[in-house]
Image (cartoon, rainbow, N blue to C red):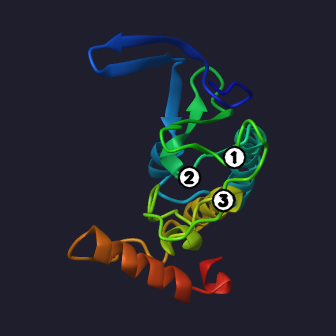
Amino acid sequence: MMKGKGIPDMRGVIIEGDSNIMIMQLLGPSLEELFNYCKRQFKLKTVLMLAIQMLERIELVQNNHFIHRDMKPDNFLIGHKKPSYIYLVDFGLAKRFRNPKTGEHIPWKEGKNLTGTARYASLSTHLGYEQSRRDDLEGLGYVLMYFLKGKLPWQGLPGRNKKEKYERIKEKKKSTSIESLC
């Protein structure tokens, strides 16, 4: 289990039938909940202060040779006893990007299914490429723009099914300029 600043402490594990239950330290609300409480817009200063801690959490994960693969406001929680402290949670989709024995980077692959949350997933992820460190950073960039603007250009696009919706999100991400996003 990964340990470090901004990673919740694991207190124990209970095995109940086919389920593994992790007991972790109590944390406060997610940044999504806080965002909603603040009428769905943070000031630039708030976003910059959050960005510093969020980048530090991603750096810690990546220094341990993992990628998170699911950047989203719901996966960043504030501390219960330290409300100015941000924690990164939900490592269910995390993956090693280096072979622990050889230190080699995972091989480049194409044709991968989207892993993570489509709204914040990198364009490369939508295009079916194996995720790497840059994809966590691009996802974080989308989260920060969401906090500043209150909405992303591809948010709420309709689709008859998940595949169609993901395709529309991908096309909107491809056609959105950095200037209009920021």
In the picture, the quarter occupied by the C terminus is: bottom right
Q: Is residue 182 above or below residue 81?
A: below
Query: Label 1 is placed on what type of residue?
Result: Met
In the picture, the quarter occupied by the N terminus is: top right
10 Å crowding of disc 3: few (<14), some (14-19), many (20+):
few
- What is the number of callouts on the image? 3
Looking at the image, residue 20 sits to the left or right of residue 152; the answer is: left
**Point 52% across, 51% down: residue:** 70
10 Å crowding of disc 2: few (<14), some (14-19), many (20+):
many
The disc, 2 or 3, on the residue closer to the chain's N-terminal end is 2
Q: Which residue is denoted by mark 3 in the rendering?
A: 107
Q: Which mark is residue 140?
A: none
Query: Label 3 is placed on what type of residue?
Result: Pro
Query: Whole-percent x and y of residue 67?
Result: 64, 48
Query: Whole-percent x and y of residue 26?
Result: 51, 19
Q: CA distance from mark 1 to mark 2?
A: 10 Å
- As helix, strand or loop, the secondary structure at mark 3 comes to loop
Q: Nearer the viewer, mark 2 or mark 3?
A: 3
Query: Label 2 is placed on what type of residue?
Result: Met
Q: Residue 114's image quarter?
A: bottom left
